[in-house]
Image: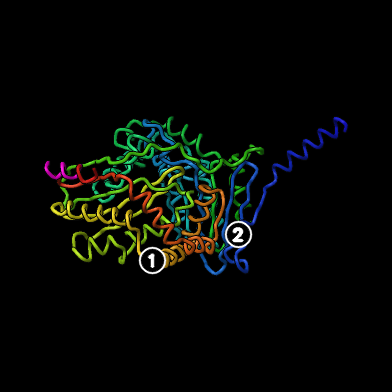
Amino acid sequence: MTSRSLRTTARTSSEARAVARTQTLLPGKDGIGTVRRTTLPGGLRVVTETLPSVRSATFGIWAHVGSRDETPTLNGATHYLEHLLFKGTRQRSALDISAAIDAVGGEMNAFTAKEYTCYYARVLDTDLPLAIDVVCDMLTGSLILAEDVDAERGVILEEIAMTEDDPGDVVHDLFAKTMFGDTPLGRPVLGTVDTINALTRDRIARFYKKHYDPTHLVVAAAGNVDHATVVRLVRRAFEKAGALTRTDAVPVAPRDGRRAIRTAGSVELVNRRTEQAHVVLGVPGLARTDERRWALGVLNTALGGGMSSRLFQEVREKRGLAYSVYSYTSGFADCGLFGVYAGCRPSQVHDVLRICRDELDRVAGEGLSDDEIARAIGQLSGSTVLGLEDTGALMNRIGKSELCWGDQMSVDDMLARIAAVTPDDVRAVASELLGQRPSLAVIGPLKDKQADRLHSAVS
């Protein structure tokens, strides 16, 4: 082969890499529910789910960054940055951004979690091009001006203060601290007053440049959308911002975690003058990729996921000790949590805690009945389907799946996995997880003797 031929072959290969690659991940039925993925040359992924029967569309961009990626001094930077991307770009002011979506009756928002951040807009299907242009502009063209950083600092401090006024919310952050200590998973997503006051414009701008590269982003759209049109509009917006210049870039792989440090038997108590005591009792759970998560979902539903659950019946229905009592799971890349929450009168916190602890021990030792498991499977299956009835939920599902798993699972496959859970599966995961020594977080007006008893409750 001549040197000219070699150059021609190399150029052709380079051009081939620059071509967008499209795959049908889920074929759907008669074109309904079809999920497609296109990977653009700059490593940007675009996934869509088509639902022609609706008149709306939800467009979102998921960033592969969360509070878990922060150092101690950067705690709160991810959420701070989420606020700042709404403050203006080279094309639009903060008012222009909000007014554009308001003018068509749409809604726009964002949220920050431990391992990802999402920005989204829900609009009529005819206004999807506008939503794509606005959200893409925010993600690629944010100015992050010093004056905006200073102005938004006050807003975030108010958000922290508002959260602190809700002990039923704060107790979950306290429980994360109990389980993970002073680590990224144990720190609050919002940051603290001290870390927010210490963050500077330059540090936030560097964080933005590092984590908002197209290879770290997933674009997701669901509703009455055409995949090719969404790809074309997204590509145009990102190329306009000069964000797709690396033709050899590849998307980052799903997060594999950092082997988080978990503790057992830890207790965190906050003495505060509240009308209720807020309690979270829990144990280490499962990573989100663990195949036993389906059995854990059934266990969680039966134990504290509804009005017929054990905890609801024992704590509220039979004894009237709490208005709100439930269990929940949180799965991360390499670990997870299983927790039980209850809000009750301070004088009854020990009774509530004893009942919850007894139920956890009983299920760990004896398992659940076949009837409880069958009912939980039905409840979990129904809630899974009903939770995907709007375009926002569909966008969340495909966007998070692409970012966290790198693949898509159909609703039918999800239902099949739930239905395949056996009583033995549930009993095995209950024995392993609930048999661990629990940790405890409590916020409320606690007396010294109460604090001593609460420490001994998890021993």
Coloring scheme used: rainbow
Q: Residue at x 43, y 49 (%)?
A: 110
**Kind of element beneath mark 2:** strand
Indicate yes or no whether the magenta region holds residue 121. Answer: no
Q: Is residue 451 magenta?
A: yes
Residue 118 position, x and y percent, is 46, 48
Q: Residues within 10 Å of mark 1 (few under 14, many from 20)?
A: few
The residue that appears at 33% across and 41% down in the rendered structure is: 179
**Residue 187 x, y percent position in the rendering:** 34, 38
Residue type, label 1 = Asp
Q: Which residues are magenta?
A: 448-455
Residue marked by disc 1? 370
* Residue located beneath label 2 in the image: 26
Report the magenta stretch's main SS: helix
Is 412 placed left or right of 314 in the picture? Answer: right
Placement of 257 over or under 285, stated as above or below:
above
